[in-house]
Image: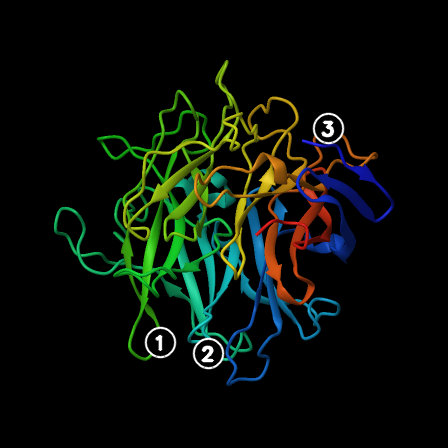
Amino acid sequence: MRRAVAAAWMVIWSMAAAGAVEVQTTENYIVPESDGGYFNPSTVYATNANEPGHGDLVQVVSVMDVSDSFTQVLIRRSSDNGETWTDFAPIEQMRRDGDDYTKYGTASLYADPINGRMIFFVQELVYENNQLASTWRKRRICYRISHDNGITWSDRINLVQDGVDSEGRPFDEQHWMEGAVWGRNMACTIASRAIRIRGDGPLQGRLLLPFQIQRVDEQGRLHMPTGMGYMASGCLIGEWNEDMSDLRWDCSNHVVVSPKVSSRGVFEPTVAELPDGRILMVMRGSNAGLEGVRGVKFSSISEDQGRTWSQPVPLLFDDLSPAPSSSSLSLLVPTEDGRVFYCGVIAEHEPRGNWPRYPVVLVRIDPETALLRHDSVVEVVDRHGDDDSNAQYVNHWAYEDPARDAIVVLTPHYRGSMTVAVDRHVVPLEGDEG
């Protein structure tokens, strides 16, 4: 990876195939100290041409008071492509019942390019006695639907898989998806980007929503080698009902890796469709507590539009060299012309567990091999001179901006474990070979 040369508000980087390109970085907004930290600034363009607000940017952020504890989810919009914004307003807020708290976080948005509906996905978590431990048993996926470009929203809907499970039992509010039972083990999305399947086939037009699910042993007890979960990944498959007021959900197989190669399994999956119709899924792993095990992301391929997935393997560069990556969120970013980019950490030194969480890079996915193109690494943001070795820029978001012919990357800027600002990085696509 080539080192970036930093200027006050700009990073100059080199791309072996394309020459020098400028990544323009600005401070997008300051996080009010009273709010806590803003994370996962999921942002989409509104797509319903028959309603006001068509073409607006709509954005949600999840607000934490301490690590892994949410207070609310906020929403705002921009009518000038992100230059100015409305004030944030709450779309979800925590509620208290005695000593227990129900909280909502790691939300994401999806805007359907065909029917114009917008979906707000969020995880619901129950903190018994306001402690994290119970959320491994009580966490689920919820969503809201908007018919008017995110101006108004439906009531919150608990996602329940359609039909019966592998043993013939109907799904319900408790046993709500294959392998997940409320009160026994959780399943959730973590700022997951849903996609609409574009390729020819029986699932064309369906939605893919990647999820993670906590593993249990044969007695139904949580499998927790590190105390921070041991998870599998997969995709929920959504089909709009006749009046587009809701979706029917099915579920793919679950994929997992040995605890000898990832002490927390595979989790925080992200998906994108390749030009030939295959679907790529990239997942977070962890080498925490494992000696001699490289920290990497894992990848899996579906050749049947997300119905089944291959056994995960380490995500490599296209010359088969390793791509060291800490245990942290990553995103696959599709463009309208079919290109796919990885956006996340690729470290210069061997990662240990969650660290380091810099630099965040953008890398083209090779459309044939589904590997990272080594000649296309773009350093989006690296540790600033005044940041310590625990600086981090993850829990980010990225999207294509057609007007700028660029990918916009939004990265939280931390002090300690909380964010103080969210920075906007505009990465031109003009230098990328199509």
- Element on which disc 2 rests: loop
Q: Is residue 277 above or below residue 324?
A: below
For the point 53% across and 84% down, the residue is 51
The residue that label 3 is drawn on is 389
Residue 4 lies in what quarter of the image? top right
For the point 60% across and 53% down, the residue is 398
For the point 67% across and 48% down, the residue is 411
The circle on residue 211 is: none
Q: Are marks 2 and 1 in contact (CB under 8 Å)?
A: yes
- Element on which disc 1 rests: loop
Residue 2 x/y as whole percent: 71, 32
Distance in Å between CA atoms under marks 3 and 2: 45 Å
The circle on residue 147 is: 2
Mark 1 or mark 3: which comes first in sequence? 1
Pick the residue in front: 353 or 44.
44
Q: Amino acid at mark 1?
A: Met
Q: Is residue 337 above or below residue 312?
A: below
The residue that label 1 is drawn on is 244
Q: Amino acid at mark 3?
A: Ser
Mark 2 or mark 1: which comes first in sequence? 2
Residue 290 x/y as whole percent: 48, 18
